Image: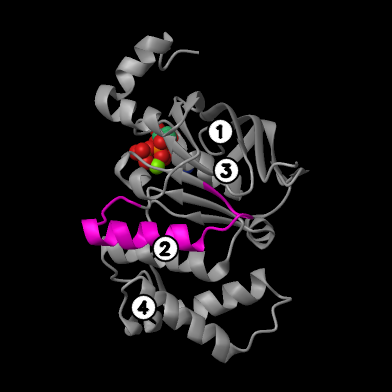
Amino acid sequence: MTALLEIRDLRAEVVEEGVEILKGVNLTINKGEIHALMGPNGSGKSTLAHVIMGNTKYRVTSGDILFEGQSILNLSTDERARLGLFLSFQTPEEIEGIKMRQFLINSYRNIHPEDQRTLLDLNKLMTELTKKLDLNQDFLERYINTGFSGGEKKKSEILQMGFLKPRLCILDEIDSGLDIDALRIVSESINNFKNDEMGILLITHYQRILNYVVPDYVHVYIDGRIVITGEKELAEKIEKIGYSTIEKELGLKINEE
Ligand SMILES: Nc1ncnc2c1ncn2[C@@H]1O[C@H](COP(=O)(O)OP(=O)(O)OP(=O)(O)O)[C@@H](O)[C@H]1O
Ligand SMILES: [Mg+2]
């Protein structure tokens, strides 16, 4: 079976400074799998997410990223989105002047040009999704993320996931800043939107969300690479003992090549 996403010994640097952030990432995600990625602040998790999406701030210096067996390194971000890659941002941008509804419809039409559904059908679907996420109806008439609370911004990202129907979802700290009820709603939505054809990479600091969105694999990511892979229990262990103990256990020398 061809993997949905395969990252092979990926190294990448910041274009402007030339500083290497990804230092040999290997990761394979198959359809239907949920992978949690956990690691200390500044270890390069968000950078990995951005490099997968083709953010031009970063340059891949070696290795490869394959989506269903094809290298996507030469594709632009919008081409990757059309293939079905999706990133929910750790810190979503506020974009004034474009309403959520307009943004979602335009994105959907671009990603799924073959879909014949009418505007009315798509609007209905959007309304259903906002209800499920416990968002006000005026949410869709507001400018993208503008003035949204932290929790609303995260729900806005999940609304996009549910509406745009991507095949690989990278969720970067979707749980940060959510109150208990919102965490439950967002987690239930992720589980609802997931299907057997979809893979999820869930970047998080806390194992709490993993009680709801149960991962098949948990990866510990330190200093630009995955250093251990386990199952859900690994996340519980990290919460108990912290990364520095894991680094010691593995004999890792951080910040040294
Ligand atoms: N565009 C950039 N220019 C300069 N430095 C960058 C850039 N992008 C990332 N970095 C640096 O790369 C390192 C990794 O950052 P990244 O945001 O990927 O970490 P993270 O693992 O997501 O951390 P957190 O858990 O705090 O979100 C940091 O030291 C950061 O300052
Ligand atoms: Mg981050």
Mark 3 nearby-residue class (10 Å; few <14, some 14–19, many ≥20): many
Q: Which is nearer the N-term, disc 1 or disc 3?
A: 1
Q: Magenta stretch: give its range.
A: 175-200
For label 4, the residue is 131
Q: Which label was assigned to residue 51?
A: 3
Label 3 secondary element? helix
For label 2, the residue is 189
For label 1, the residue is 13
Q: Is residue 151 left or right of residue 23?
A: left
Query: Could you give the CA–CA distance between mark 2 and mark 3, rounded to whole angstroms?
Result: 26 Å
Quarter of the image where the N terminus is located? top right
Q: Identify the image quadrant of residue 203.
A: top left
Mark in the foreground, 1 or 2: 2
Mark 4 nearby-residue class (10 Å; few <14, some 14–19, many ≥20): few
The amino acid at mark 3 is Val
Mark in the foreground, 1 or 3: 3
Residue at image position (67%, 38%) is 6
